[in-house]
Image: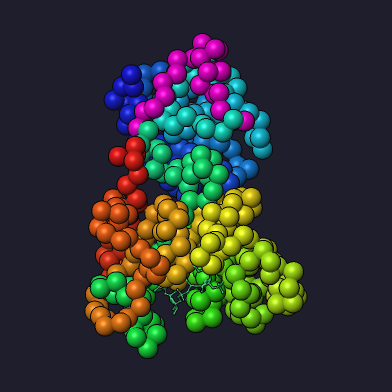
Amino acid sequence: VANTAEVQAMLRAVELAALGLGATSPNPVVGAVVLDSVGAIAGYGFHRRAGDPHAEMVALEVAGIRARGGTCVVTLEPCNHTGRTGPCVAALREAGVARVVYAVDDPTPAAGGGAAALRAAGVAVEGGVLKHEAELVNEVWLTSVRFGRPFVTWKYAASLDGRTAAVDGSSRWITSEAARADAHRLRAEADAVLVGSGTVLADNPQLAVRKAGLPSRQPLRVVLDARVRVQPTARVLDAAAPTLLLVAADQSDGPAAERLRSAGAEVVGVPTAVGGGLDVAAVLAELHRRQILSLLVEGGAQVAGSFLAAGLIDRVVGYLAPMLIGGDGVATLAGPGASSIDSALRLRLDHTVLLGGDVRLTARPIRAGTE
Ligand SMILES: NC(=O)c1ccc[n+]([C@@H]2O[C@H](COP(=O)([O-])OP(=O)(O)OC[C@H]3O[C@@H](n4cnc5c(N)ncnc54)[C@H](OP(=O)(O)O)[C@@H]3O)[C@@H](O)[C@H]2O)c1
C-alpha cells in the first residue's frame, strides 16, 4: 500500500501531468516525482511534448544520485518499449530505484508490461494509486487508446435560457470578451475543431487560433459537408491552418469536391447516416486514423445533436450569458433529443467558473461503471 508521502507525491505528479495538456498529442500527459530513500522529494518532471523525454526521465535526471534506493511516483505505468525515447523501465533500473508507485496501467500493447518487467528485475511495484484523478487528467489519450476514437468536447455559447441566436438569426455577441477568449484557448488545446456546413454557410468562421500568447500549433479544421455546399471562397479554407472537408462518399469525386480541392482543401468521402448527414462514428474513425486525439465540436445545433444521438460526447463546455432570448430563438441542440426525462443524458457537473460576467460549466456524461 502507498504511504502518505507517496500519495502526496502522486497528487503533485497529477498536477505536473496537467502542465502538458494540449501539447503532448499523440502521447499521454504524464507527471513523475522521485522520492529519495527517506521519502523526501528529490526530483520531479512532466512530459512536455511528443519526442521530448518521458516524465520519469526528467524526474530521474533532477534527482541524480538521490534516486538510488528511492521511489519513483508516476501517473502512468512506466513504458517498456523504445519509441522516440528509450524505455523508462531500463532507466529506472539503472538509476537504482527500489520502488515504483504508479496510478494507471498502460493499455497500449506496445508500451505496456512495464510493471511486470520491473517486478521481474526485483523492483517493488504498486499500481492503481489515485487512479481516478490520473485517469481524468489523461482522459483524452485514454479515450483514444481504449476506444480507438478522439475524445469529443462539445462547446457552445448560449443565453441563460439555452438559446444560441434570436429569431432573426443574430447571435453576435451573446457572451463576453473574456468567455470568447477562453473558448479560443479550448480551440488551441484541441487537435481538431469541427463544425457543420450550416455554420460555415451562416457565419463564415475562420476557426483558426489567432490570440497572441497561445501556442502557434493550429488545430485541423474539419467541416461536415455531406452535400458539398461549402464554397471555395469560405474563410475556413484559407491558409491559416489545414482544413479537412468531409463529404458523402458518393460526392467525393464530383465537380464540387474537385473545385474545393483546387482551393487547397482536402476533401474526403465518408459514409452517410440513415437519416442523412455523415455517419458520426465514421467521421471519428477518419480523424483517429489521422492521429487526432482531441476533437472540439463547435456546432451548430444539428451537428451537436448528431454527436449526442450517437452517444459520442465525452465532455460539455457551456458558456452561459446572463441574458434571456426566449420565443423561437435557436436552441443549442437540434435533432430528436430525449423523448422523456428518463432517457435524457445525465451529466456530472465537474466545474463552474465566472468569466467576465458569464458562467462556464464543464460537465461529463455519467457512464455506467465509471461512478
Ligand atoms: N452559439 C454557438 O455556440 C454556435 C456555435 C456554432 C453555430 N452556431 C449557429 O448555428 C447556426 C447553424 O446551425 P445548424 O444547426 O444549421 O448548422 P450545423 O450543425 O453547423 O450544420 C448542419 C449541416 O451539417 C451537415 N451535416 C453533415 N453531417 C451531419 C451530421 N452527422 N449531423 C448534422 N449535420 C450534418 C448537414 O448539411 P449537409 O447535409 O449539406 O452536409 C447539416 O445541414 C448558425 O446560425 C450559427 O450562428 C452557434
The x and y percentages for residue 40 are: 36, 25
- Dividing the picture into quarters, in which one does residue 168 lie? bottom left
Residue shown at the point (30%, 54%) measured from the top left? 343
Q: Is residue 174 above or below residue 146?
A: below
Q: Is residue 22 visible?
A: no
358 to 31, vertically: above or below = below
Counting from the top left corner in percent of width and height, residue 179 is at: 35, 70
The correct choice, above or below, for 283 with respect to 46 in the image is: below
Horizontal side of 332 relative to 280 (left or right) equals left
Task: Specify whether residue 122 is in view.
Answer: yes
Q: Nearer the viewer, residue 181 or 347?
A: 347
Residue 128 in magenta stretch: yes
Q: Residue at x 45, y 43 (%)?
A: 138
State left or right for residue 248 relative to residue 95.
Answer: right
Q: Nearer the viewer, residue 98 or 21?
A: 21
Residue 363: % across, % down: 32, 54
Tell me which residue sits at (51%, 21%) in the image: 115
Which one is in front, 344 or 221?
344
Q: Position of residue 102 (x, y in %)?
A: 43, 28
Query: On the rendered structure, is 318 left or right of 269?
Result: left
Relative depth, front residue between 69 and 245: 245
**Residues in magenta?**
110-130
Quadrant including the N terminus: top left
